[in-house]
Image (cartoon, rainbow, N blue to C red):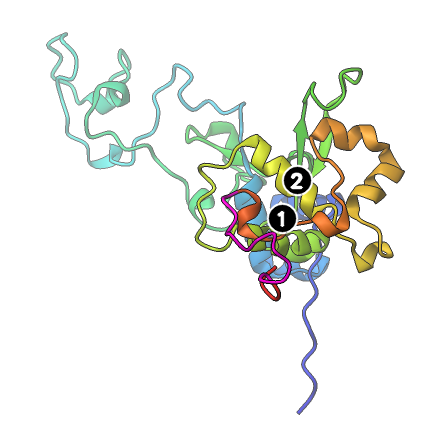
Amino acid sequence: MPEKTRKTFRRLSHQDRLDIEKGITYGRSFSSIAKSIGVSTSTISREVLRNRVRDRSTRYGKGIRRFCANEKDCTVRRLCDSGCEKLCRVCTESLCTIRCPYHEAATCQRLTGVPYSCNGCSKKATCFVERYVYDAAQATHAAYLYVDDDDIDDDNDEPIRVYCADPRRPQQRGCLEKNHTYIREILPKGSSFDELTDADVRLMASHINSIPRTSLGGKTPYEVAGFLYTDELCERLGISRIDADEVIRRPWLIGEPPPWAFDRESADGKI
């Protein structure tokens, strides 16, 4: 049997997102777009659904009668106090969709199914349904989280750009997976995070980042961060250096230690 090739995944680039936007606008299928940029069709679907945004230029709800899913068969009358006997759906004096208890906002098949957006729709100019569009620039921007924290750098007014991995893509944050393993040693599966304080999290981060890593040439993350950014950054984050023989990777780091925790002889094999 031929050897199975391992699938490789990658983060979508801005050019990929531009190709997706262009492909939707020109009516290409998701499978065709996926093939052209080298990803799966489900990746395109998730990308569009996750990053489509409401079209603020839509006429939906801006003083005009909004379309109702029941409009064609609606026989409701006398929603207002004018004594009018006309069908409310044809009235131009009042918005029946605001008062009618049977109103259901009309939806478009382009939004409930592929392509999940209004890009390239020929009816956009006259459409009254709430619209959503996929914009490559906004989608790329949404892939990053901007944090403005005065506690990090009092002299810097610029926001901090934080990398955010795509959902279901642990390989995009492979270097963090080891940290997750260490966190689970301190907070085993099933532990509640509700009672954790900022001090607990900083203490845990201090111990975890004081563990030497083979990938860092035997250095600790704390030492590498201090070399690249100075120790002041770690101090501002509330992370301190812990000596190698004092690092604790067990639940009692932030809880009550057992009687034998600091007795090396009785704790043999338990720490």
Residue 264 in the image, given as x and y percentages of width and height = 64, 58
Amino acid of disc 1: Asp
Seen in the picture, residue 146 relative to 94 is either above or below; the reply is below
Q: Which residue occupies 63% across, 54% down?
A: 182
Q: Which residue occupies 61% across, 47% down?
A: 24
Amino acid of disc 2: Ala
Seen in the picture, residue 218 relative to 210 is either above or below; the reply is below
Name the foreground residue: 57 vs 2. Answer: 2
Q: Which residue occupies 19% across, 32% down?
A: 74
Q: Magenta part of the protein: which range? A: 255-267
Residue 43 in the image, given as x and y percentages of width and height = 59, 55
Q: Is mark 1 on a helix, strand or loop?
A: loop
| Residue that label 1 marks | 166
Magenta stretch: helix, strand or loop mostly: loop
Residue count near mark 1 (Cα–Cα under 10 Å), binned few <14, some 14–19, many ≥20: some
| Residue that label 2 marks | 143
**Labels 1 & 2 near each other (Cβ < 8 A):** yes
181 with respect to 38 (left or right): left
Residue count near mark 2 (Cα–Cα under 10 Å), binned few <14, some 14–19, many ≥20: some
